[in-house]
Amino acid sequence: GNAQMLNMLQQQGLQEGIVPSTLLARTHLPTCRILFVPQDEDKISPHQCLIRKQIEAFAATEDHVKNHARGRNKPIALGQVGIRCRHCKGLPLRSSQRGSIYFPATLVHLYQAAVNMAGFH
């Protein structure tokens, strides 16, 4: 799960918090994954589990790079890790609701992006 992913990154000599979100897309990890893992039920609240079941991590495609830069200071990179509402993922990017997709600059910001999604989407 997530611990295994961070362990792999730390073995590559990177520290948690400064890992660019484009690095994961260059690994051999799945390209799309629900944030919830069964072990969450023992560690976090039922509400947080429910939220994690609605959010998935994924790698940015050419379509995201070209069409999803609203309000961003930095451009989205091909393969950059983002999170999205799993129920909205099939909608055209131009018509997706605000807060349905986030592309944080570093892995540390994934948590805050998920909090924002849960509160505003």
Image (cartoon, grey):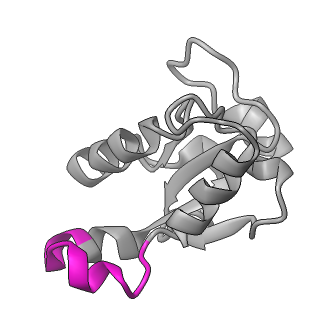
Report the quarter where the N terminus lies: bottom right
The x and y percentages for residue 49 are: 27, 76
Q: In this view, does 35 lie above or below 14?
A: below
Does residue 78 appear left or right of residue 117 in this picture? right
Q: In this view, does 92 lie above or below 113?
A: below
At a point 44% along the width and 80% down the height, the residue shown is 37
Q: Is residue 75 above or below residue 103?
A: above
Q: Tell me the quarter of the picture where residue 28 sits.
A: bottom right
The x and y percentages for residue 16 are: 52, 39
Question: Closest to the observer: 1 or 8?
Answer: 8
At a point 55% along the width and 24% down the height, the residue shown is 70
The x and y percentages for residue 72 are: 55, 18
At a point 25% along the width and 45% down the height, the residue shown is 120
- Residue span colored magenta: 36-48
Residue 47 falls inside the magenta stretch: yes
Does residue 28 appear left or right of residue 67 in this picture? right
Residue 97 falls inside the magenta stretch: no
